[in-house]
Amino acid sequence: MTEKEIHQHRKDEHLSLAVKYWKKGLETPSGLGFQDLRLVPQALPEIALNEVDLSVPIFGGRFDFPFYIEAMTGGSAHGDKLNEQLAEIAANQHLALAVGSQSIALKFPELAAGFARVREINPTGFIFANIGAGHGLEQAKRAVDMLKANALEIHINTAQELTMKENEGDRSFYWLENIHEIAEKLDVPVIVKEVGFGISRGIFEQLKQTAVSAVNVGGKSGTDFAWIEHQRGGDFELIGHGFTTVESLLEAQFAKTQLPVIATGGIRCAEDVFKSQILGAILVSSAGFILQNLIQDGPDKVEQILENWKSDLTKFYTLFGVKNLTELSKIETLYSADMRAFIEQRNF
Ligand SMILES: Cc1cc2nc3c(=O)[nH]c(=O)nc-3n(C[C@H](O)[C@H](O)[C@H](O)COP(=O)(O)O)c2cc1C
């Protein structure tokens, strides 16, 4: 295989293994989940369903809905095809979409056209470009230009890199300066995102000092890249590492970050979106769950799911007498004993 084919093969393996093991992340949770947050019922909500406005202000504009399709793929024939389907879904549903890492197209420029199809299919939608944190400003600009992207995601994935096979993964992780320089000089917003191991209080505090526009917690409880890389032959077995999405959202609160927080990691229903917002996320995104449904049942099924998320989320807002994002703080919450213990230890 050529170097390009090796890269493409890796992309395709990520896709098939993410689908194969999607349930594993949900079935073997370690750490706090959405069940640890209970909501006090509101039997007299004094609201009508049609008064609910799900839109959220972000990146100097507004998203119609507080969720979107998170970064997964691109750069192989299979990955490009899936991105095309996702772009159509995103366009039909008025949802934002992130492409997977464009590193492969920065290295092999002939692959850029495959990524660019996303913009052709969805000319006016909100699209996130995506690169790893080892890239510099020029590469960041190229990634954004490739898609005429509205924002750039920079993924931070130390645990994934270290669990990759010896000849594949990065082994040096000096990223902060790159992130700051890109965020400062790029003319679209920059989001720093984890890929499934969560973000702790100290990192929110560090990122607060940079020019980034938002942080995506990328928490544990959904896609597990340590397991996926182990299945691909990596011999560093890393089980249960990281903070869940719920824990990472609490950490963001402890850090008192002013930056918008995005919740990703194991999101699979409107209730997860709702509870993420109650825990402080302005936006929520989902990758593995969407992929699994796309592969198993096709794009129509994914559109149906996303339609349901919109109507279910509207009903959750109504159920608690909440008209919009700012009113979510009215909802009273109950924390499980585990959640209280976590808060006691971490909210120092
Ligand atoms: C098949 C697959 C490929 C992914 N590739 C990327 C990537 O290239 N860049 C990135 O930032 N995140 C990537 N991710 C991580 C997701 O964006 C997300 O952070 C992570 O999967 C956790 O969300 P989930 O539990 O909803 O899947 C990928 C996820 C999957 C399932």
Image (cartoon, rainbow, N blue to C red):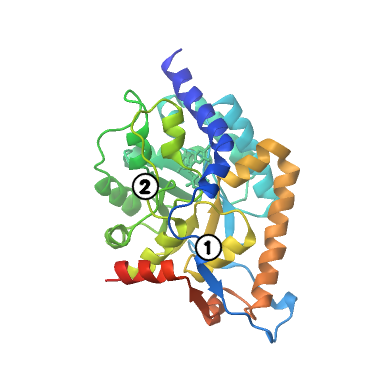
Residue 241: numbered disc: 2
Helix, strand or loop status at disc 2: loop
Q: Residue at x 72, y 64 (%)?
A: 311
Q: Residue at x 53, y 43 (%)?
A: 24
Whether residue 276 is visible to the viewer of this picture, yes or no, is no
Place of residue 236 in the rendered image (x, y in percent of width and height, measured from the top left):
33, 33
Q: Residue at x 36, y 66 (%)?
A: 342
Of 79 and 168, the residue lying toward us: 168
Horizontal side, residue 56 vs residue 94: left or right: left
Residue 34: numbered disc: 1
Work out how far the residue at label 2 is from the one at label 1, CA to CA, in angstroms: 18 Å
Place of residue 183 in the rendered image (x, y in percent of width and height, measured from the top left):
34, 52
Query: Which kind of residue does numbered mark 2 sit on?
Result: His
Horizontal side, residue 348 vs residue 263: left or right: left
Image quarter where the C terminus lies is: bottom left
Q: Residue at x 25, y 48 (%)?
A: 177
